[in-house]
Image (cartoon, helix red, strand yellow):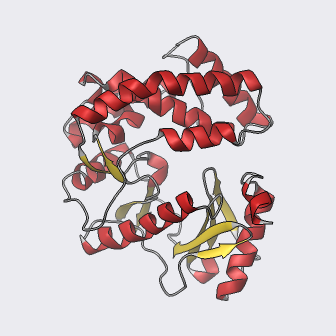
Amino acid sequence: MDAVVNHQGLTEASAARALASACSQVGLVSQSADLLRLGENAIYALPSEGVAVRVARADIEDIKRKVAKELAVSRWLTSQGFPAVRPFDELPQPVQADGRLVTFWEYVPPSHAEPDLTDLAGLLRDLHTLPRPDFPLPVLDPFPIMRRRLTLAEGVERQDVEFLTEACDRSEAAFRSIMADDTGGLIHGDAHRGNLLARDGQVLLIDYEAVAIGPRAWDLIPTATAVDRFGLPPAIYTAFCRTYGRDVTDWHGYHALRTVRELGMTTWLMQNAHSGPAAAEFALRMDSLRKEDRERRWHAL
């Protein structure tokens, strides 16, 4: 059964089954759970329990390693005094449920004060000055997950999958060259405003699935790209650069890593691009990538 579930993809229905199973195993009530996000993982809030639940796509070995890393990174960041969200370690971690791996985290209620990109810049500046943890971290490599998404792709045109596969092949050589020149240090790996939460006047940097060792520019590129792709006002980007202390668009490797980032965003969206707004946005992104149009406006979903 697990093998079938693992290849179905993560849908609202399959994530809900895993949520119910995992909560039943640890004694939580899941009937009133709120789905906060459905992407690479499904994130649920259980406000009455003070718990957030993260449902991974599968329980294969690669994901097991990532989940173990997320838990270790969170505990380590907390020990360093860095503002991180904590695992809910009163419960067993992780739990296998319906062919997926499930973890439990402290629930951070919605805040009236929304974190902004200068908050992100300050957190990244501080994160990038931390020492490497005393446990092994992977070296940044976004290609295996992109290729896995492409291998498992369902409900999208074959020519789109073929184009993205070839685009990954073309961009990998430049990426490997940059990595050879700049091994960097500790990076978040998925640094954007959606991975910020506010709690008691403090902004937290969350989601440690992509934490790795790599060029620090990797964490700055999503905000730089947002000026062209998502209409971020240049003045806000200037404030981001001022807070962090660097404008990554001046760096020689910017365009190569931006291409890899955009392929990652597009293959991520592809997983849910079967119909509706996600399908329309996927088509738009594919058209802009084929035409190498770097200024075509994308839309965040």
Q: Nearer the viewer, residue 135 or 252?
A: 135
236 on left or right of 151 = left
- Report the label total: 0
| Residue 171 showing in the rendered view | yes
The answer to whether 229 is drawn above or below residue 51 in the figure is above
Q: Residue furthest top?
A: 291
Q: Position of residue 252 (x, y in %)?
A: 26, 21
Any part of residue 200 in sight: no
Q: Which residue shows up at 77% across the image and 76% down it?
A: 31
Quarter in which the C terminus is drawn: top right
Relative to 87, residue 273 above or below: above
Q: Is residue 273 left or right of residue 53?
A: right
The residue positioned 44% from the left and 70% from the top of the image is 71
Q: Position of residue 131 (x, y in %)?
A: 19, 59
Residue occupying the point 35% across, 34% down: 236
* Residue 214 x/y as whole percent: 30, 44
- The one nearer the camera, 266 or 51, is 266
Q: x, y (%) of residue 146?
A: 56, 39
- Left-right relation of 133 to 4: left
Screen quadrant of the N terminus: bottom right
Observer-nearest of 214 and 262:
214
The residue sitting at 72% across, 39% down in the picture is 153
Q: Quadrant of residue 33?
A: bottom right
